[in-house]
Amino acid sequence: MPDRAAVAFDDIHKSYGETHALQGVSLEIRVGEVFGLLGPNGAGKTTLIRILLDIIRADRGSVRLFGEALTREHLDQIGYLPEERGLYKKQKIVEVLIYFGRLHGLSRADARVRALHWLDRVGLPEVAGWKVDRLSKGMGQKVQVAGTLLFDPELCVLDEPFTGLDPLNVRLVQDLIEERRDAGLTTILSTHRMNAVEELCDRVALIHDGRLMLYGDTDAVRAEHSGAEVRVALGNDLPPVPEVTDSVLEGEGVWRLRTTPETTVAGLVSALVRAGAEVSHVEPLLASMQEVFVRVVQERQRDQSQGRESLS
Amino acid sequence: MIRRRQIFTVAEFEFLSIVRTKGYVFSTLGLPAMLLLYGLFAGWLGESLKSQIEGGAKVFGVVDRAGVVDLRQDQQGTLLDLPAEVRGAIESSGVGVEAFGPVAYFTDTVFRGFDDLDEAKAALLSEEVVAFAVVPDDFVAAGAIDVYSIDGFSLPRRTARENMAKMLQEQFLQQVPAEVRDRIRDPVSTTREWVVDAAGVVSPDDVAARILRFGVPGAFILVFLISLLTTTGYLVQGTATEKENRVVEVLLSATAPEEILAGKLVGLGAAGLLQVLVWFSMVIAAAVLAAGVAMAAGVALPVKALVVGAVFFLAAYFFYGAIMLGCASFGSSQLEVQKLAGFWTILAAVPMMFLPVIMNAPHGTVARVLSLVPFTAPLAVLGRVALDPEGMAWWDLSLSLAALTLSTWLALRFGARLFRIGLLAMGSRPKLREIWRQARLAK
């Protein structure tokens, strides 16, 4: 995967009156990756996305897109599925999709062909001639996904794309995101579904109170915030060793072990072997993104409340 | 930098979206069609009444005890003359006066004399007459008559009284010299009016022509105002729909607010202009049909007003449209948007209140001041030019247009800033102070 930056935010600041929505956020999103933009409600994610889309301007800082300073011409390369979304209720679906395609530089004929193709891709070929108000919520969501992707944007921002979708359609959208990665196209995924983040995102950033709290490879972030837990498969009983502080039998010969903080995986294995264990498999356990999210946000909130107490 | 491609795309979508709605088609074609139907109905009704009047004259008996009525033969009314200037105008148009139908009195009544009450009563019972009147001996002194009918409804009392009075008047007139009769019937049949201008030059003042001359600009201003309000109405309605439907953020991700604003103004303005064009075409078609009468009455089609009107319509539309869109973008529902835009609608109609003043003095101080204020300039200038096409000096017109153009430019800039802020304002509406602050900060 090339490391060239699709998007580079540098020291972004944005305030609304007394509210500091973003306070010096800097991060890069690489070409061809699926990037998870995470954070609790009101963290500043939407503000950052709107700055990327030139809907609002940063008070300070800069945005570069594919190595160039952001201009309106770049908007043709960006697909956006906002969290608060809708369609023109009284219009025909194909007409709405054509309109969205044309706004991104497609000709009417090309936009029509692509609209029909993408309706087919999301499993709704029959709705092209329907008025929007005939669609169910889930169908509407899929049409909006089609509208976002129909011009094959170089960069796509999906804000909560799974809302209102059943598990089958969640899978469909996940497949579409993975296809984009395979095609070398960049996707920014903002979602509260942490299992989807684990499955899809190459890298993540977590924003809280307008600040960047976490940023890096998904697995590295998880590892960084993982406790000392290891899953081992043994051919015999688990012998008592001082490096293991807690153990849970998960299955036949499969143990989940909590170790002392200073114990490495290699150290644990040699201790177990020394104690007579027959070790057939060792797997360091990563914290889930859900755990990472909760831990980071709660730590931040704890720090803030302590700060307020010490001030008072 | 504003991208023309985006403006065109938005404009095309907005134009097609609105012209395909039933409401638009109805108001564009249906409204004039309804007016046409109304005209046809009124014409049919007139014809129908006319035929009833001509064909259904009722016989009214008279027993003359006072000896004032000569009814040896049945008597029926005659056509009443049209005013001379109206008759002249109609005749010069080549249209026969008869086409306008009879303007007559007591043509619906035939008076028949009877010698005594019993004879009249017998005629009443045999339905030879619908009613009869007895003129008593002391009629000349007292002026009272007695009317007899079967049910009291056979002949409307007012008609009977009026027709009887006319018939008696005609009878009395036979006793005075012929040359005096017309003056008694109609003491002042024609009024020749003259106008003396500031230089002392006397010229004829034709009342009918004056009414038409004021009527045409009046109607012109009204159509202009309705068109302006309808078109700006489409604008704010469309924006409210997008906010309600939550489409706005998708649009903003592809298109700058200024481009959306410009696209909407162009697209919906084109829809509005198309509507105006249809309406004016119908008005002009009607005017061409009536051109003979109008020209004879000294009315010219306000060609200069049409040209100036088109220019000022565009300027006014962009001026009001930008402001109204900017304000309306803060509303989150149709109702709220209408409230926010409604204030400007009232401002646009202000010159209508000053119309009598403008008509009296098209180039007076009030008219001039209204022409320089951007909110009132379009209608004020239009009224002045329609009333007195040659009287408005070029510098006067240019000054007004310059003020309006400058204001329109400012309105577009400020409106676009408000639009950018307003489109993203969901939930509670920001306070005026905050809006002002944001508008100044917005880039």
Image (spheres, rainbow, N blue to C red):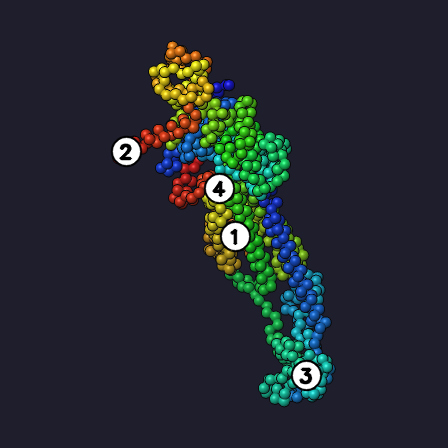
Measured in 3D between alpha carbons, the distance from the residue under mark 3 to the one under mark 1, in whole angstroms, is 61 Å
Q: Can residue B433 be seen in this view?
A: yes
Is B271 left or right of B410, judged from the image as shown? right
Q: What element carries label 3?
A: strand
Q: Where does residue B333 sit, x and y in percent of width and height?
A: 49, 46
The chain holding disc 4 is B
User: Which residue does the numbered mark 4 point to in the structure image?
Assistant: B412
Q: Residue at x 43, y 14 (%)?
A: A236
Q: Where is residue A79 in the image (x, y as percent from the top left)?
A: 53, 31
In front: mark 3 or mark 2? 2
The CA distance from mark 1 to mark 4 is 20 Å
On screen, B313 above or below A206? below
Residue B133, compared with residue B285, is above or below; it is below
Out of A183 and B22, give the one closest to the viewer: A183
Question: Can residue A221 be seen in this snapshot?
Answer: no
Along the polypeptide, which appears first: circle 3 or circle 1? 3
x 39%, y 33%: residue = A21
Name the residue tied to disc 2: A309
For the residues labelled 3 and 2, say whether their Cβ atoms are less than 8 Å apart. no
Label 1 sits on residue: B379
Crowd rating for badge 4 (residues with CA inside 10 Å; few <14, some 14–19, many 20+): many
- Please state if B404 lies on the left or on the right of B35 as rendered: left
The residue drawn where x is 67% and y is 60% is B40
